[in-house]
Amino acid sequence: MLAPMNASNDNIVALATAPGIGAIGVIRISGPDAFEIVNRLFKGKDLLTQKSHTLHYGTIVKEKKIIDEVVLSLFKGPHSYTKEDVIEISCHGSHYILQRVMRLLIDEGARLARPGEFTQRAFLNGRFDLAQAEAVADLIASENETAHQAAINQMRGGFSLVIKNLRAELIHFAAMIELELDFSEEDVEFVSRAALTQLITDLQTAIEGLIESFSLGNVIKNGVPTVIAGKPNAGKSTLLNALLNEEKAIVSDIPGTTRDFIEDEMVIDGVPFRFIDTAGLRTATDQIEAMGIERTHSKMKEASLVLYLIDLASDTIKAYHKQIQDLEKTGVPFLIVGNKTDQAQETLKNIVASDIRSVLITASTKDNLVGLKTKLLEAINLDRFKSSNTIVTNARHYESLVNTKMALGQVIAGIDGQVTSDFLAMDIREALYALGEITGEITSEDLLDHIFSKFCIGK
């Protein structure tokens, strides 16, 4: 666990740009003495008399020795990222220069920031809530348009507003229930049980929608694990290469060439897919191939989607039906990919094409890869979320929503069972607690340390 952090009594410094040689490197310092610390090293204008949100050129000097020419960006609290005094020092991107400047700042009274400490201070100082703070890390990690948009929406408070509105509705009724406890001897009912039931039902519906959206949120952050499976020589490695548009996997006419899985990612219409090419499914001819086939079965069980290739040129109709039956037993969503349409047996081709779960391609010539990509997007069924900007992408938020739903279910059960107000109040408080954990209205130091320790240093 990280040591306790104080949001205002000391000064922190860190490299805000990625490590490595570059044209520019930025060092960020935040705290009550940030301006004084930098001013003691800066030769140029007196920083203590300058306005916020201004840039200043000068040099960093120690004992009359120039360390570097720099540009300073000044941000006076509370109009800064952390709501404290902040200075960003743009230096030349030499590793030596950056480390030397940071060492000088530490010698002058700053300390090295912990991972995520700038953002943690922003949260503790009230710049944004916990869900918005977590979105900062998601924004930095975003690698496609969909992930970027989801993080931006959450960082700007879209998700938090939904949660706060739900919580506000529940707080009103909770207050009425708590008031009933003060008049318990008079058997007074301040809130209609029918109205409370309707509210809880409406809240459950809204929360269920958020919980359901996590399937999309998880895809946005982590991609869709998609296993490419089938018998040897069905064209699995050829398909992987065609999708990625590079020679990622070895392609050979010799059955059993792929002994282990090969993995890579691509983005289709803003959705990241992690394609996994696997060993061909058959009776193994040696121990190494047997291990590869066993890993194929394991990967198929873990996958969100299986692309199962059928060799339209050489498979028999009987073998095709047996493969599909075995595939259905796994319980994993799958697409049937009829490959080698240019060499296809017409009868088998028509049987495969008649299945609504199928798509026909020729991987070697990249024929109908567009149709395959369309089927991939249809298979993961994300269209139902396209119209909504509120998507749950964080596993911690998902867990809190599930706990909220359970607590609300207990409230409904209590109303149906005509329990007393004190028991209803307990269940409502539990629901409020779970919702409050999402935005940080209810939190603990351990939770904060756990969340912000996953951030990069300097953010």
Image (tube, rainbow, N blue to C red):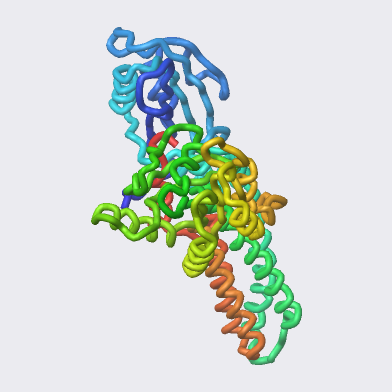
User: Is 395 or 250 nearer to us in this picture?
Assistant: 250
Whether residue 399 appears in this view of the structure is no
Against 275, is 204 above or below?
Answer: below
Q: Count of labels shown?
A: 0
Nearest to the observer: residue 438 or residue 104 = 438
- Taking 40 as reference, is 257 above or below it? below
Residue drawn where x is 56% and y is 38% of the image: 144
Q: Which quarter of the picture shows residue 29? A: top left
Position in image of residue 368 (x %, y %): 62, 41
For the C terminus, give its image quadrant: top left
On the question of residue 188 being in view, the answer is yes
Q: What residue lies at 38% left-to-right and 31% top-to-bottom? A: 13
* Residue 105 occupies quadrant: top left
Q: Position of residue 174 (x, y in %)?
A: 64, 73
- Residue 301, given in percent of the width and then of the height, sits at 43, 62
**Point 40% across, 38% down: residue:** 251
> Who's the residue at 41% across and 44% down the image?
263
| x and y percentages locating residue 100 in the rendered image | 29, 20
Which residue, as the protein is rendered here, is positioned at the far left? 287
Of residues 32 and 18, the one drawn nearer to the viewer in this rendering = 18
Q: Reply above or below: 333 against 386.
A: below
